[in-house]
């Protein structure tokens, strides 16, 4: 089948020869991909990787699958075929995919030498989003959504209403990342919030907070177009590019109700400056959440007394669970997350044949001008215009 695939370090290209997926486990489904979004993780796999993908000559710990693999894990799809053990879905259902691959999924590859390995401690306790062997469909475990079709197990699929535009459905996975961060922060309605960075995850955090009833949000972002998107989504914005760190922190603290810092901060950038701001812009007893993916090769200075003096809290947020997917879908379908606001995140829709040159490279070289580009493996939906789904 046709796919945009990861072949090896520095080699991502379109192919017409990727093997068709097939049902092995009884609870698996084959999906026709309508849209699949490009994530920052996909870009890092090209510029710095392999990260989650297996290194040349190696195979993934969970699935025992090597390269090449179709990339893409932000999937909106239509059920094409179901296995004999599937109970929740029918052919023709519109679905989104929770793309984690963990110890719980080893049974899907019965020929793998790792199939009978015991679950890691996190998976045993139900925290599969922090599995010791965590990978993603479309990023190491198996081929993903930059292809015509994908096979997944039933527990990873969620039905969405046929009234929901499929391009917006493709945003549910990145919004679920943000929803998880808001949830584990133990967000309280009426609290004050600062978001550092308004790329896809920063904008998704605006939507996730809206879904939790929060509308008074401040966003700090140096790129003009991304500030404009945050404003369109209802946030107050601040440009940190012209000031020094201490001046910016003072100004941001003053933008919180009462002028004494925010109850919650969400670092969606992952730089030394935003780490500092996420802590220093908190009020006492405030909570800072790191949502960004940091490079493991770039440690930063951290001063515990910045937390201790005012009994602040600092935590990280990783991926999502079924709770987050279900909550985001419900919030979209109930209108607590507005479809029109979500559409602001979509910069373009590009066929997979042009996915590397016209989409991935554009996001790498012109990231200040783009937010989310969706690939269309089957050319369903309009490539221009409002993106209305025209699959039927």
Image (cartoon, helix red, strand yellow):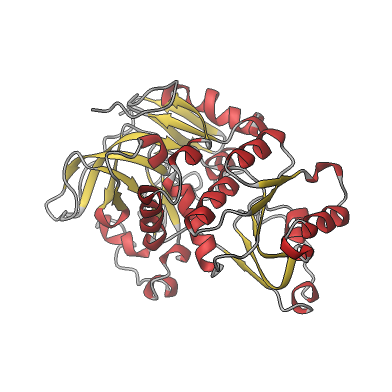
Residue 186 is left or right of residue 331, and the answer is right
Name which residue lies at 28% across and 57% down: 155
Where is residue 73, by image quadrant? Answer: top left
Seen as rendered, the residue at the extreme left is 84
Q: Quadrant of the N terminus?
A: top left
Residue 311 is left or right of residue 374, and the answer is right
Would residue 68 be visible to someone looking at this image? no
Q: With respect to residue 238, does 264 lie above or below?
A: below
Q: Count the marks.
A: 0
Q: Position of residue 327 (x, y in %)?
A: 39, 58
Would residue 104 be visible to someone looking at this image? yes
User: Which one is nearer the viewer's eye here, 287 or 50?
Assistant: 287
User: Which one is nearer the viewer's eye here, 299 or 31?
Assistant: 31
Q: Position of residue 297 (x, y in %)?
A: 69, 55
Q: With respect to residue 221, does 2 lie above or below?
A: above
Q: Position of residue 58 (x, y in %)?
A: 45, 49
Q: Position of residue 96 (x, y in %)?
A: 34, 46
Residue 22 is left or right of residue 70, and the answer is left
Q: Quadrant of the C terminus?
A: top left
Name which residue lies at 87% across and 57% down: 246
């Amino acid at each position: 089948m046709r796919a945009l695939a990861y072949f090896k370090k520095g080699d991502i290209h379109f192919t017409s020869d990727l093997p068709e997926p097939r049902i092995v486990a009884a609870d698996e489904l084959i999906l026709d991909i309508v849209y699949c979004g490009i994530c920052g993780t996909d870009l890092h796999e090209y510029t710095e990787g392999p990260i989650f993908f297996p290194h040349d000559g190696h195979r993934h710990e969970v699935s025992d699958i090597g390269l090449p693999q179709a990339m893409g894990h932000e999937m909106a799809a239509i059920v094409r075929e179901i296995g004999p053990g599937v109970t929740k879905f029918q052919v023709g259902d519109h679905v989104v995919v929770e793309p984690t691959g963990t110890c719980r999924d080893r049974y899907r590859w019965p020929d793998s030498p790792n199939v009978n390995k015991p679950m890691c401690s996190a998976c045993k306790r139900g925290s599969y989003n922090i599995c010791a062997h965590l990978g993603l469909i479309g990023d190491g475990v198996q081929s993903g959504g930059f292809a015509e079709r994908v096979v997944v197990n039933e527990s990873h699929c969620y039905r969405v209403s046929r009234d929901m535009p499929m391009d917006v459905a493709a945003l549910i996975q990145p919004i679920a990342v943000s929803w998880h961060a808001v949830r584990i922060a133990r967000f309280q309605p009426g609290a004050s919030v600062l978001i550092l960075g308004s790329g896809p995850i920063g904008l998704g955090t605006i939507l996730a907070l809206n879904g939790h009833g929060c509308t008074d949000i401040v966003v700090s972002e140096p790129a003009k177009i991304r500030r404009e998107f945050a404003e369109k989504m209802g946030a107050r914005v601040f440009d940190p590019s012209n000031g020094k760190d201490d001046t910016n922190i003072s100004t941001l603290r003053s933008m919180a109700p009462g002028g004494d810092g925010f109850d919650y901060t969400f670092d969606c950038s992952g730089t030394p400056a935003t780490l500092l701001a996420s802590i220093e812009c908190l009020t006492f007893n405030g909570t800072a959440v790191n949502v960004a993916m940091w490079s493991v090769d770039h440690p930063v200075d951290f001063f515990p007394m910045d937390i201790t003096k005012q009994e602040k809290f600092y935590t990280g947020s990783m991926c999502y669970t079924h709770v987050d997917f279900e909550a985001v879908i419900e919030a979209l379908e109930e209108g607590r997350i507005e479809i029109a606001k979500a559409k602001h995140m979509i910069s373009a829709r590009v066929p997979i044949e042009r996915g590397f040159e016209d989409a991935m490279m554009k996001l790498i070289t012109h990231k200040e001008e783009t937010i989310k580009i969706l690939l269309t493996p089957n050319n369903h939906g309009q490539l221009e215009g409002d993106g209305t789904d025209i699959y039927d």
